[in-house]
Amino acid sequence: MNLIFASLATTLLVARALSRNSLTTAGILSAILTAIIHALHPWNLPFVLLLTFYGLAMRATRVKHEVKAKLTVSSSGGAGGEGARNHVQVLANSIVASVLILVHCYQLGVISSRGFAQRKDVCFHGDIVVIGIIANYASTLGDTLASELGILSKTPPVMITTLRKTPPGTNGGVTLLGVLAGGAGSAIIGLVSVLLFPYCPSSIDGSGIHLPEGGAHIPLGNNGNYCPAWGIKEKALFVAFVTVIGVSGNLLDSLLGAVFQKSVVDIRTQKIVEAPNGVTVAPQFPKSHLLEANKHQVLVQPSSPHLSTRAPIHSHLGQGPQSSAAAIPASAIASESARRRNAVAAEKDDAMEHEQEHEHSRAVISGLRWGVLNNNEVNFAMAVSISMVAMIVWKMAGMAKCDSCSGVIG
C-alpha cells in the first residue's frame, strides 16, 4: 500500500470525523490504529475496503437523520438516533479484518521476526485469508446499511424468528428495504474486490496448453493443475458470492439480535429505546439511583446548601441561629423533627411512585430469556462467524491456492 496515500486518506477521514462529531476521541484513535494495520498490507485492496466501509456507513447514517431520530427514543428520554461512535463500535466492525490482515502479511513475508519488509510483487492466487477479509466488510457494511436505511421502510419490520410485526429499530427486525440495502452494500464490496485484486498471470491456459509469450491470462481456483481464467463471468460470480455472504451476515446479525439481545420498548410511545454506543438498555432506572437522587433533594436546601442542620429550625421559628440548643424550646424541636420526618416520608413516597411509573413505561419485547449480548457483541460475533464460513466455503470449493500460480508477478 502506498503509505503517502494512506496517510493522506487517514488524515482526511479523521478531519471529517472531527467536523461531523461522528467518532469519540477513543473512536478516532481506534480508527487510526485500524488504518495503520490496513496500510501495512502490500495490496491496495484492504485499505480501500476500509475506506469504502467507512464512507458508505457514515453516509447512510446521515440519510434522513432527523426522521430516524424520531422513530426511536433515547434511554435518557430524548429523541433517538446514533450519536458519536466510540472505540468499541469501531473495533466491533473492523477487528476481524485487522487480525486477518496481520495474518496474511505474515504469510506474505511482510511481517516476520526480522521486522517489516516492503513487497509489491505478491499477487492473488486464491488466498483464503483474503476471502475472510472481504467477507468481514461485506457483512458489516451490509448490516450497517440494512440498519440505517431499513428503518426508513414504509412497511413495518417483522421479527426474523416469528415473522410478526415489530416497531422500527427492534433487534431482530427485518424489512425488504433493509435486505436490499444490505445486499447492495455487499455487492459494492465484491465489485471493489474484483477491480483491485492483483491477479496472477499464467502462461498455461485452463486446458494445460502453454500460451505464447505475452499471452498470459488470469487464473482462478484449483482444478487439478490448471486454473480457469478470471473473465467477466468469473468476476460476476465472485461478486455474487460476496453478495450472498454479506446478506447471510445481515440475516445472521438479525437472528443473533432477536435471540441474544434485548429490545426495550417505551409503552407510552410504542418506540424502541436506544442506549448510546450500542450498550444494552435498562428496562427501568435502578432503584438506588432514584432514591439517591431524592435523598439529595431532601438534604440540599434550595436557598443555601451551606446552612447547618439547625438553620432550617431557626428559620421556621423566625429566629436567628443561637449558640446553644437550650435556647430553643423543646416542643418546637419536637414539632420540627416531626415535620421533617413527614417531609422525608413524602419524598420517599414520591420516589417510589415515580419509579413505579417509569418501571411500567418500558417493556422487553425480545431477548428476554437469553438477552446477554449488546449490539457491539452481536456485530463482532456475526463478523467472526461469517468470515470463518466464507473461508470454509472457499476452501471446500477448491478455490484456495491455485497450483499453477507462482504467487509472484513476473
Image: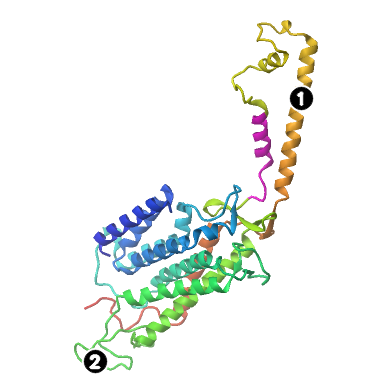
Image coordinates for residue 241, horizontal then vertical, percent? 45, 79
Image coordinates for residue 347, horizontal then vertical, percent? 73, 32
The mark found on residue 360 in the picture is none
* Residue designated by label 1: 341
* Residue designated by label 2: 211
Neighbours of disc 1 within 10 Å: few (<14), some (14-19), many (20+): few
Query: Which quadrant would the C terminus be assigned to in this image?
Result: bottom left
Neighbours of disc 2 within 10 Å: few (<14), some (14-19), many (20+): few
Q: Is residue 389 visible?
A: no
- Magenta-colored stretch includes residue 293: yes
Image vertical order of residue 165 relative to residue 11, above or below? below
Residue at the spot 32% in from the left edge and 56% down from the top edge: 12
The three-letter code of the residue at mark 1 reads Arg
Residue at the spot 37% in from the left edge and 74% down from the top edge: 193
Q: CA distance from mark 1 to mark 2?
A: 98 Å
Residue at the spot 38% in from the left edge and 71% down from the top edge: 130
- Magenta-colored stretch includes residue 290: yes
Image coordinates for residue 78, horizontal then vertical, percent? 58, 49
Q: Nearer the viewer, residue 284 or 218?
A: 284
Does the magenta stretch mainly form a helix, a strand or a loop? helix
Displayed quadrant of residue 405: bottom left
Residue farthest to the left? Answer: 213
Disc 1 to disc 2: CB gap under 8 Å:
no
The boundaries of the magenta stretch are 282-297
The three-letter code of the residue at mark 2 reads Leu
Q: Is residue 255 visible?
A: yes
